Image (cartoon, grey):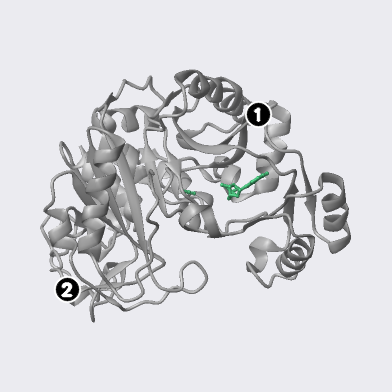
């Protein structure tokens, strides 16, 4: 099979690395940090004549890329724009949860200060304020400080903090408990659950500091039983697919439930319409067979064959740029990636990485693009020391081992070899 993965982060690198064991894989646009491992191209997915397209990030899904590919007869894993509203609009999500009776926090929608303050009074602390639209995982404030909550509300409504995405906000009742990421591969009617993972969302050790896109992850989550996962499947995923079907939406893709394990059972925090990042970097290395076949079956609306999952554990540590999440610095030289990659049980996935002096692959001028004769424009690997930071989350270092402790020590051994100016990472992933 010829599979095209759309996206440019560590998640797409992890997809491509797994799938390329048995299939031809091209990532578009990809990034310079994955070129040592997988083929990247600046061409559009369609031009690469794929048997299957896997769309990684939410933005192109919300924008209807899956609909456009399907309309031109291409098999695609990822929901159309209608299904992607589950992530693209928190208000749509909460409405659907109410209709499908998916357990989740009580909520209200506010477009004015008055409405917002009334909701603060109704739910009490901790105050949870979310932008309605997409904000790359950073549009949520959870605080018990009323003054801070009011300030955040005012800034979001005025379009100051997240532009248009923030001018309508969802305010929720605060929930408490440990969090869990559950991934369902859906074929429109049925689903299979992938291995579970936990994401570390706060910037600093001990879950302090601002929310980020995710600073690390582990899989499996040892404190969560199979019964809890089954409950997430039956109380959340199944009724959600049923409700979507009733709305005329056939959801073929990965549905990611962010779940809080509260005293009164698992409750949905949010849905994402794609794989988690950095969860993909721990879950996918543990899938040792059948991934391409399962993704294709889901894309075609057919029964999903079972996956082979290793009983090894995995841990990912994200290496972020100085200034992340508010204002990441770009252009710092990265060293040590090759040395880290050569360690046993260590993978280094590229995210916010570019080649020094070079433009990102999607902006290479045509005269610098070679051709391999099958419609791709394969980019040659970039050597260590020629890579620079080019985004907030720069690299994801994954350790795989017989136990969580072994995976952890392998991941951090890899991290120790990599350096760039202003490097920030958490030291407590999986501990
Ligand atoms: P979200 O982008 O909706 O996943 O929210 C980001 C993070 O904010 C979640 O992972 C939770 O840690 C926290 N959060 C979101 N909603 C709530 C809530 N209703 N109660 C408590 N924490 C929440
Ligand atoms: N790890 C959080 C996310 O992918 O949204």
Front residue of 413/174: it is: 413
Residue that numbered label 1 is attached to:
263
Compared to residue 257, the image places residue 199 above or below, namely below
Label disc, if present, on residue 249 of the rendered structure: none
Secondary-structure class at tag 2 = loop
Q: Is 190 situated left or right of 83 in this image? A: left
Which image quarter holds the C terminus? top left
Which residue lies at the image location 47% right of the left edge and 27% below the top edge?
Answer: 224
Q: Position of residue 412 (x, y in %)?
A: 27, 53
Front residue of 176/394: it is: 176
Q: Position of residue 85 (x, y in %)?
A: 60, 45
Which residue lies at the image location 68% right of the left edge and 73% below the top edge?
Answer: 160
Which image quarter holds the N terminus? top left
Residue that numbered label 2 is attached to:
385
Q: Is 15 situated left or right of 382 in this image? A: right
Secondary-structure class at tag 1 = loop
């Amino acid at each position: 099979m010829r599979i095209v993965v759309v996206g440019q982060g560590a998640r797409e690198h992890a997809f491509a690395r797994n799938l390329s064991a048995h299939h031809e894989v091209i990532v578009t646009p990809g990034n310079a940090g994955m070129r040592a491992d997988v083929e990247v191209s600046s061409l559009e997915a369609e031009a690469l004549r794929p048997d299957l397209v896997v769309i990684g990030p939410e933005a192109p899904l919300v924008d209807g890329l899956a609909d456009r590919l399907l309309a031109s007869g291409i098999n695609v894993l990822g929901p159309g724009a209608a299904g992607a509203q589950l992530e693209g609009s928190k208000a749509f999500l909460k409405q659907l949860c109410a209709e499908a009776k998916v357990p989740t926090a009580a909520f209200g929608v506010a477009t004015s200060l008055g409405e917002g303050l009334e909701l603060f009074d109704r739910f009490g602390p901790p105050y949870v304020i979310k932008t309605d639209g997409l904000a790359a995982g950073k549009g949520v404030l959870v605080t018990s400080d009323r003054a801070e909550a009011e300030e955040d509300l005012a800034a979001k409504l005025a379009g100051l903090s997240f532009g248009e995405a923030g001018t309508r906000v969802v305010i929720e009742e605060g929930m408490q408990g440990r969090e869990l990421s559950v991934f369902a591969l859906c074929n429109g009617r049925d689903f299979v659950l992938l291995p579970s993972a936990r994401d570390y969302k706060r910037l600093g050790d001990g879950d302090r500091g601002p929310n980020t896109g995710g600073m690390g992850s582990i899989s499996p989550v040892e404190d969560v039983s199979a019964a809890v996962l089954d409950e997430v499947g039956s109380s959340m995923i199944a009724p959600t697919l049923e409700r979507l079907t009733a709305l005329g939406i056939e959801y073929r893709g990965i549905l990611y439930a962010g779940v809080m394990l509260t005293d009164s059972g698992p409750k949905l925090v949010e849905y994402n319409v794609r794989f988690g990042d950095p969860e993909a970097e721990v879950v996918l290395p543990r899938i040792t067979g059948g991934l391409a076949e399962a993704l294709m079956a889901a894309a075609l609306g057919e029964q999903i064959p079972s996956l082979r999952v290793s009983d090894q554990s995995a841990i990912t540590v994200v290496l972020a740029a100085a200034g992340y999440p508010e204002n990441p610095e770009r252009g710092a030289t990265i060293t040590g990636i090759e040395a880290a990659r050569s360690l046993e049980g260590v993978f280094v996935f590229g995210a916010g990485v570019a080649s020094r002096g070079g433009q990102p692959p999607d902006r290479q001028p045509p005269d610098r693009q070679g051709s391999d004769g099958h419609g791709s424009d394969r980019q040659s690997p970039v050597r260590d020391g020629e890579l620079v930071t080019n985004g907030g989350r720069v690299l994801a270092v994954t350790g795989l081992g017989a136990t969580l402790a072994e995976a952890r020590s392998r991941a951090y051994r890899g991290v120790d070899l990599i350096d760039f100016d202003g490097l920030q990472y958490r030291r407590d992933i999986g501990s």
